[in-house]
């Protein structure tokens, strides 16, 4: 059976590579894009490799000890294989339906130079952007002031209770959660990317100073609670920005160096949190186990739990604002699963959530029909987002938002499904960022209309 599973795995991998290359326009690691990051990070590394270990029962992963029925190992493997093929196929078919050539349009976008909008109104735009940036910088300071303890500082002091301090920093926050989540955690890194692009293209001192302030604040807000992924994804965002503006060109040697540096940093963070050094190179524990197995193992736990040991959630995972409209209790599947499988950790305040591949949450709510529906829906969502951004002007604002979604959509693919149906955070972030651009754009359109009777803007 081992050889059979390996053969199926290799065939699915080959088909998936072909489809993702057609859908995204490129799978080259030297030219990363939204679809290629989903393939490499969300699916291949975080899900597909681990599913092979799990179905062949060679994983020996601690989470999988909770899955007592082996049939769920096989079912899970089949469903992950389905995602690997049907998701990119859906994206590709939608692109073909609207006459979109991903290969042509992505390569043209990648090579296109970044253009700075507003020739005469750059000062006006800068002042609006700086105003929003000032709010975000104050929000970062506010977040730090409203914490009882800052885990990053406790690490420097040599604290041995960092695991619980991390949870308390997230859930024991004493301030306004919206200010922290929207302006500090979400908006600050995005604005730093846009400011960096402006600084690089304009070479103006005001943009350079603003970008330095925002980048510094972004590193603070992505590291203060010692979470490992936020700082890595922020660094990846900055690397993508540097690539898309032509500041750096990737080579395989540079990728190897960046990968080695990233892994070293990850190991260092595990060591700082008190992890056993002997587990660092083990495929099913430490950082390697976290990369290949910890994201996909909860999916198999979802399959055993929901509809068997726990009732289906039947839509409870929709965002709270929607649940309130229908008088329904909000419940994310990852949180429910953590409470069921690890109640002691939840009670101790050291547990987070058992997030996994998006089909896990879809299954937890609507069983197998939910899985199929979620794959098709996500394919439609990705196709629309990808086509829109590749056809928008390549200026700092649109490019910055494209990079934001290029990083955060792959993260959400292994975080849940319902965020793709309605995501208040993404809506608010987009509204704030685009409003700065649109205020100037609309004013120019009005001025042009009053001047020469035409509605043409800049």
Image: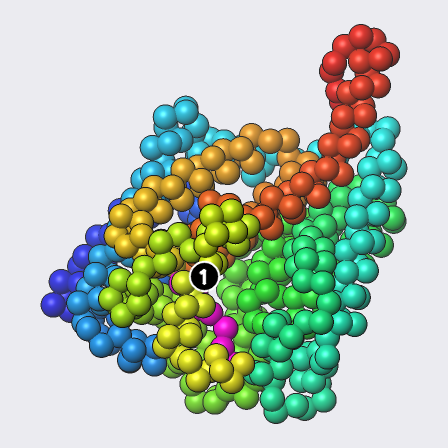
Residue 149 vertical position relative to residue 414 in the rendered view, above or below:
below
Depth check, front residue: 95 or 297: 297
Residue at 45% over, 68% down: 335
Residue at the far top in the pictured view: 453
Residue 203 vertical position relative to residue 64 in the rendered view, above or below:
above
Depth check, front residue: 128 or 386: 128
Residue at 70% over, 43% down: 433
In x, y percent, where is residue 363?
32, 56
Residue 232 vertical position relative to residue 368 in the rendered view, above or below:
below
Mark 1 neighbour density, 10 Å: few (under 14) some (14–19) many (20 or more): some
Position of the C terminus by quadrant: top right
Depth check, front residue: 333 or 59: 333
Q: Residue 257: in sight, yes or no? A: no
Q: Which residue is mark 1?
A: 331
42 with respect to 61 (left or right)? right
Q: Residue 148: in sight, yes or no? A: yes
Residue at 11% over, 68% down: 1
In x, y percent, where is residue 28?
44, 48
Q: Tell me where residue 296 sits by quadrant.
A: bottom left
Confirm whether the magenta stretch covers residue 353. Answer: yes
Residue at 71% over, 80% down: 149
| Start-end of magenta stretch | 350-356
In x, y percent, where is residue 34?
49, 46
Confirm whether the magenta stretch covers residue 61. Answer: no
């Amino acid at each position: 059976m081992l050889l059979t599973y390996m053969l199926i795995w290799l065939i699915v991998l080959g088909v998936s590579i072909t489809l993702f290359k057609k859908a995204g326009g490129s799978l080259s690691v030297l030219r990363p894009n939204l679809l290629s990051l989903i393939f490499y990070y969300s699916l291949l590394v975080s899900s597909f490799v681990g599913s092979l270990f799990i179905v062949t029962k060679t994983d020996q992963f601690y989470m999988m000890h909770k899955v007592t029925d082996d049939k769920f190992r096989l079912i899970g493997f089949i469903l992950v294989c389905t995602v690997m093929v049907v998701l990119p196929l859906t994206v590709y078919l939608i692109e073909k339906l609207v006459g979109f050539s991903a290969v042509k349009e992505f390569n043209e976008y990648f090579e296109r130079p970044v253009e700075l909008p507003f020739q005469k109104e750059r000062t006006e735009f800068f002042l609006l952007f700086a105003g929003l940036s000032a709010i975000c910088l104050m929000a970062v300071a506010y977040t730090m002031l409203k914490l009882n303890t800052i885990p990053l500082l406790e690490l420097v002091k040599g604290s041995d209770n960092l695991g619980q301090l991390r949870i308390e920093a997230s859930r024991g926050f004493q301030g306004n959660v919206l200010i922290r989540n929207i302006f500090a955690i979400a908006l600050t890194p995005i604005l730093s990317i846009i400011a960096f692009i402006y600084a690089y293209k304009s070479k103006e001192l005001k943009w350079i100073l603003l970008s330095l302030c925002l980048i510094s604040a972004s590193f603070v807000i992505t590291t203060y609670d010692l979470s490992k992924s936020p700082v890595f994804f922020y660094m990846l965002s900055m690397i993508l920005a540097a690539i898309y503006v032509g500041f750096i060109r990737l080579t395989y040697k540079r990728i190897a160096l960046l990968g080695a540096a990233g892994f070293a940093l990850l190991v260092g963070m595990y060591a700082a949190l008190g992890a056993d050094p002997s587990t660092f190179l083990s495929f099913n524990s430490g950082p390697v186990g976290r990369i290949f197995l910890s994201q996909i193992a909860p999916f198999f736990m979802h399959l055993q739990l929901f509809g068997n040991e726990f009732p289906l959630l039947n839509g409870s995972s929709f965002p709270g604002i929607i649940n309130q409209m229908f008088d329904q209790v909000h419940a994310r599947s990852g949180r429910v699963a953590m409470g069921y499988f690890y109640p002691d950790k939840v009670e101790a305040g050291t547990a987070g959530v058992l997030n996994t591949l998006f089909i896990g949450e879809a299954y937890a709510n609507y069983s197998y029909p939910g899985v199929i529906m979620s794959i098709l829906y996500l394919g439609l969502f990705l196709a629309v987002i990808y086509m829109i951004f590749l056809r928008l002007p390549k200026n700092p604002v649109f490019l910055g938002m494209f990079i934001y979604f290029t990083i955060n959509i792959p993260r959400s693919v292994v975080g849940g499904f319902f965020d793709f149906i309605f995501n208040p955070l993404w809506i608010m972030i987009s509204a704030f960022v685009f409003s700065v651009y649109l205020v100037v754009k609309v004013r120019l359109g009005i001025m042009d209309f009053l001047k020469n009777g035409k509605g043409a803007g800049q």
